[in-house]
Image: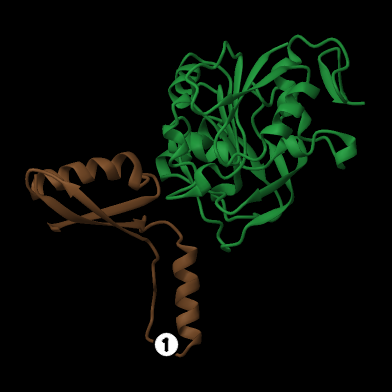
Amino acid sequence: MRRVAVVVFPGSNSEIETVDACRDAGSDPYYVWHKDTDLKHADAVILPGGFSYGDYLRSGAIARFSPIMDAVAAHARAGGPLLGICNGFQILCEAGLLPGGLVRNDRLRYVSRPVRLRVEAVDTPFTNAYRRGEEITVPIAHGDGRYVADAPTLAALEAEGRVVWRYIGENPNGSTNGIAGVTNAGHNVVGIMPHPERLNAPVLGGQDGARVFFSLEARDATQPVGHLRAVGGQHSGV
Amino acid sequence: MPAFRVEVRVMPRGALLDPQGQAVTHALQALGFGEVAGARVGKHLVLTVSAADSGAAETRVRAMCDRLLANPVTEDYQVAVEPA
């Protein structure tokens, strides 16, 4: 059972679903307020979605200077698993913990609907319970989700297998190369624009997002956890 | 210390698609301003800063831009200093 710190900023709005998804996956999640400076011995850290500081100036630009972010950066530097979802991804880019940035959607509209994704990298703490190339459905809900980076950075991400998820079919926001999520060079820091915590149980209409959280536990799991079951190294829906 | 009025112009990187600029261009053209070949939309910030002189004010504001006011991945900025 991993201890998962879910950081709450003023304007976060997905922390409850994120904690629920961690709990369903068998973890021990808890909230950490952004003004705290201690992650309380977290095994993993998640920055949830929302609109921290009202997205003033740029999405994530002010949250990255919250007091807790020093501890978050130290956790990442030590190789600890760190996931940013939506606004959390924007904060990680602003903080320089992930490369590139997220700018206004190409059609200028906030987009909230399910999208199809391909899981491209399974060597991260948040995707190891997926199969490489697996196609999943997860909702997006963002206005600033178009991933951009300079050409050398993009080339490195592609060459090193650090694009973790890619939109398939229609590109909902004009993201470069259809990128929906990336990881750092150490593969321990991961950012994703879609919301896996919003589609993690059959009652919600699907559970393709559940294994993002289950991946943290998958190595040790032998029992059914939430709606997922690990048998002989394979993790599948029940 | 004297006060300076510092204007900061933050613009999306030239190589980046600027959908707001494109929307403004199309709207102007639809209104009959066919001479508009392009528009880009950025941000204009006006700071009031105390500093020993205008050079010191500019140095400090550039540091503010690098840390917070602009994102070097997606934006460029220009700084103009004048007495407040």
In percent of the image, x 50 and y 28: which residue is there?
Answer: A184
Residue A213 appears at what percent x and percent y? 72, 25
> In the picture, residue A22 is in which quadrant?
top right
Crowd tier of the residue under label 1, counting other residues whose Cα lies within 10 Å: few below 14, some 14–19, many 20 or above: few
Q: Is residue A231 left or right of residue A141?
A: right
* Residue B22 position (above or below residue B28): above
Query: Of all residues shown, which one is farthest toward the bottom?
Result: B32
* Residue A5 position (above or below residue A222): below
According to the image, label 1 marks what residue? B34
In percent of the image, x 47 and y 70: which residue is there?
Answer: B22
Query: Of all residues shown, which one is farthest toward the left?
Result: B53
Residue A161 appears at what percent x and percent y? 57, 31
Q: Chain ID for label 1? A: B
What kind of colouring is applied to the model shown? by chain
Chain coloured brown: B
* Residue A24 position (above or below residue A117): above
Per the rendering, the colour in which chain A appears is: green
Residue A114 appears at what percent x and percent y? 76, 49
**Which quadrant of the rendered structure holds the C terminus of chain A?**
top right
